[in-house]
Amino acid sequence: MNNAKMWLVVKPTVGVPLFLSADAVGSFAVHVAVLSNTSWVSDFLSGQELGTGDAETAALKAETGVANAGYAVDGTDGTRELMVVLPDGTVAKAVLQTKEVLASGSAPPNIATN
């Protein structure tokens, strides 16, 4: 037991209830954070189809007229362009250039495989 000498400073009648109450408060705080920051948990607990709590988000997108979207287009020279529509309506463009295209599941040439 690493902290056996702690009970010489703190009485067990004070320390054990304090530890258990701190654990309960922390657990309660985590559960409140999960319930308030996700939409699917409340849907699950109320027996509704998952994703119906996203109606608020859909209403906000319909109100602003902007939807988050991203598009990838392959170029003729081996590049790939990414077009992203940001929430404020601006469009961002990124061009990805690779030296060679690797097949799915293959290792890069500089890594030895066994």
Image (cartoon, grey):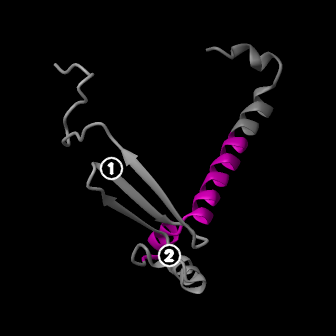
- Numbered circle sitting on residue 79: 1
Instruction: Choose mark 1 or mark 2, whichever is in front.
Output: 1
Would you say the residues marked 1 and 2 are in contact, meaning their CB atoms lie under 8 Å apart? no
Q: Residue at x 66, y 42 (%)?
A: 23
Looking at the image, tell me whether mark 1 or mark 2 is earlier in sequence order: 2
Magenta part mainly helix, strand or loop?
helix
**Taking 30 as reference, is 111 above or below it?**
above
Location of the C terminus (image quadrant):
top left
Q: Quadrant of residue 107?
A: top left
Q: Marks 1 and 2, Cα distance to the nearest angstrom?
A: 26 Å
Which residue bears the numbered disc 2?
Answer: 67
For the residue pair 55 and 110, the one nearer the viewer reads as 110
Tell me which amino acid carries mark 2.
Ala
Residue 103 horizontal side relative to residue 18, left or right:
left
> Does the magenta-highlighted stretch encompass residue 27?
yes
SS at mark 2 in the image: loop
Residue, far left: 114
How many residues crowd around disc 2 within 10 Å: few (fewer than 14), some, or many (20 or more)? some
Q: Residue at x 63, y 49 (%)?
A: 27
Residue 53 horizontal side relative to residue 50, left or right:
right
Residue range highlighted in magenta: 20-47
**Taking 14 as reference, is 67 above or below it?**
below
Position of residue 106 measured from the top left corner of the image (x, y, whole percent): 19, 35
Q: Quadrant of residue 21?
A: top right
**Taking 63 as reference, is 41 above or below it?**
above
